[in-house]
Structures are given as C-alpha cells and as structure tokens.
Image (spheres, helix red, strand yellow):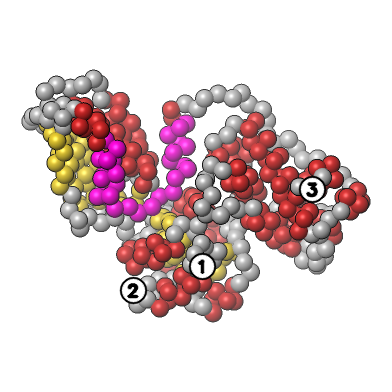
Amino acid sequence: MTDQQAVSPLVRHLRRALHHLYDPGALRKSPLVSLLGLDAEEGASALRRVLLAAIDSLKPRANVPPQAKGWRIYRALYHRYAEQFSPHEVAKALGLSIRQLRRQEAVALQVLADQIWTQYGLSAEAMAALGEAEPEPEELEEEPIQAPSREQELAWVGQSQPSETVVVNEVVQAALKVAAPLQTALGVRIRCDLPTSLPRVAVQGGTLRQALLNTLTAAIRAAPGGEVAIAAQTEGARVCVRIQPSGGARTRGDYSESLQMARQLAALCGGALEIADAPPGGPFAAHFSLFAATQATVLVIDDNADTLQLFQRYLGGTPYPFTGTRDPEQGLSLARELAPRAIVLDVMLPGVDGWEVLGRLREDPQTAAIPTIICTILPEEELALALGAAAFLRKPVSRQDFLATLAHLLRA
C-alpha cells in the first residue's frame, strides 16, 4: 500500500476525472494526462481508456464470492463511473445507504489510486507538483438510515437479478426439495406430472423458485394429510404450471399472505399467478403463467453479472427478450437451443475466452448464421470482424449505441 498522504492528491484528481469521464473537454484539461505520460493529441480518449482499464483490473475473479470486499470496491467504481449510474442507483444496486456508499466510494477511490500509483511508478514529488483538484459539487447528501419497506425489497429483487432461461422441471424440483420437511411433517403426498418436453421459460430463476416455494408451502399447509397435485403444459407462447391441494383434514393457519407474496414474485419474473376459486375437494388452485423463451431472444454471454443486468435494462421495452449467462459453455448450448436473433459476446471470459466461443459459433451449422456482436474493453475491432463477428462494440456501451447496432444487424 502506498503512503496515503502522498496519494491523496491523486485521489482528488481521479475523482474529478471520473466525474467527467465522458466529457472530452474536461478530461483533456486534466493534469493526469501529462502525469501518466499519455499522448497529448489523444488526451481525453487516452485518459478515459486508462481509467476504465484500471477499474477493470480491480474486478475479482469469477470464483470470488459476490459479497466479498473486492466485488464491492469494483462495483462501486464500475456502476458509478463506467456506467454513469446516479449515486442513488449505485446505493440501491449495492444494497447500501447513501452514507454507506460515501464510505465505500472513498475506499474504492483509494484502491484505484494505489493501483495507478504502482502501475505508473509515481512519486511523492510528482504528486506535489500536481496541485490541487477543483472541488466537485457534493452529490451524496446525507439521508436517514432506515429499514427498507417490503415494496422496496421487492423492487430490489426485480432490479438485482437478470432474466435467464430455465427448465421448469428443475425449478419445481428445487422448490419441492426445500419444502420436503414441511411436506413430511404434515403428511402430505405430492403428485407431480411435468412433461419433459416443456420449453424453457425466460424468467428470474431464483425469483421463480421462491414464488413456487411460497405457493407449495401454502398448498401443503392448506391440505394436511391430503395431496398436492402439480401439473404443467404449454399453451401457445406460455408455459402454465398448476398447483392444487386437495383432501386435507383442515387448513393449518392463514396461507393468504404466502399466496399474495408468490403473486408479486411471479410478476417480477414477467409472469403471472392466478388463484382460482376453491375446486371440488380443495381450498384453491394456483395457476402460474410464464413466457416461453422465444427465437427473438438476444443472448448475452458475459461473466460480469453487472453487465448482464445492464443489457437486460437496455433491452427492456424492446421486442427482443433478454437471456444471459456467465458461463461460455452454457452460452454455446443456449445458442443452439434457442436460436437467438443475436448474440452479444464478451472476450475476457473464464476458461474459454470469447475468441474461441466466436470460432465455435461460426463453425457450428446451427449457430453460424446468428449475428454475433463482440463487446469488450479491448481495442480489437479488426480482429473481431476478421474472425466473423457481425459487429463490434467497445465497452462501456450506451443503450443508444447498443440498440442502434442491434437494429442495424437485424434489419440486414
């Protein structure tokens, strides 16, 4: 760790440059251009590349737990400056209060300054000659720390998890496994009739699992000593799952709140849950309606969960459903299975890099015709196009540029 007093002027100049990361005029005037020995003619673009690369260098490896300190530091910088989220959006994304975000940003900027100090071999003398940075307007106003409401928690769930394509049978079995102790304790039989031919559904996998679990526990409690029947079928572009308790001796407590929460969670998945009037022999029947993954899907393969979430936001309100994966091998399987309209592919992936994935996509007759957009921090547009990419986007990517590229490819 470098001496904090020596690095502090660098921290202040970094903060100012990052606040103006996409303002060429302000970046060009930054003393960091000369301090880091950057090409004066490139000026703003050179400094922007250095800062984005420095942030990216702090990204933890894929096997580091998402709650680790390294991920908090990286995400604080990436969301706030690379993606240009507002402070309140960053706080929500990280599950922090504004006061906590203030402290997290200070730590993250210090780590970034240490990284640049070491990489460029800076000295205390160079810092002394740098001078003070002009202060930035205070953006992070203090606000009272209070527990989030239930509605805020639900909104966070809806925003924090990217949509993905999942197998209905697997999600139902996962929910049944969790509910098994309650099922055994109340002596409830489970009758499950799920066709193996059901198409995948485009949902938030974890949210759907919890919605099914809430409904299952309500059904089990509604029919102690009885039976819960689970069935599913395809109806047009939807997959419908039915959960119906019957034959119970008596209802154990009130299960209406569980069903209401399941309904809200199903809505976050882009689906719906309807509770029908009590059928013969049972207290209720629950009907899940979920969208099947379609061939209009845009598949994003990127090991950064934040990037997947960003592209999901970009595709919101468009005719192209989002499907994302952090696993390149799964991405190849999904490309064959879903035949998406387009694939967005990162290069720096764990295990199998994006160049190899692109080659395998081009060689496979099932995926060769799918246009692939290489999206990376690397300046390798010519290489990407030579290897068969249909287009190239340099991170960070704005929604306007992404949708314009996508529209151009799909029109072609």
Residue 210: quadrant of the picture: top left
Quarter of the figure that contains the C terminus: bottom left
* Place of residue 70 in the rendered image (x, y in percent of width and height, measured from the top left): 61, 46
Label 2, residues with CA under 10 Å away: few <14, some 14-19, many ≥20: few
Q: Hey, what amino acid is under mark 1?
A: Asp
Name the residue nearer the viewer: 156 or 390: 156
Contact? badges 2 and 1 (CB < 8 Å) = no
Label number found at residue 406:
none
Q: Who comes first in sequence, dot 3 or dot 1?
A: 3
| Left or right of residue 189, residue 311 in this image | right
* Place of residue 358 in the rendered image (x, y in percent of width and height, measured from the top left): 47, 72
Q: Which residue is mark 3?
A: 2
Residue 63, can we see it?
yes
| Left or right of residue 304, residue 196 in this image | left
Residue 188: quadrant of the picture: top left
State yes or no: residue 390 in magenta.
no
User: For the point 59% across and 31% down, which residue is it?
Assistant: 97
Q: Who comes first in sequence, dot 3 or dot 2?
A: 3
* Place of residue 378 in the rendered image (x, y in percent of width and height, measured from the top left): 62, 66
Label number found at residue 353:
1
Q: What is the secondary structure assignment of the residue under circle 2?
A: loop
Span of residues in magenta: 152-179
The overriding secondary structure of the stretch rendered in magenta is: helix
Label 3, residues with CA under 10 Å away: few <14, some 14-19, many ≥20: some
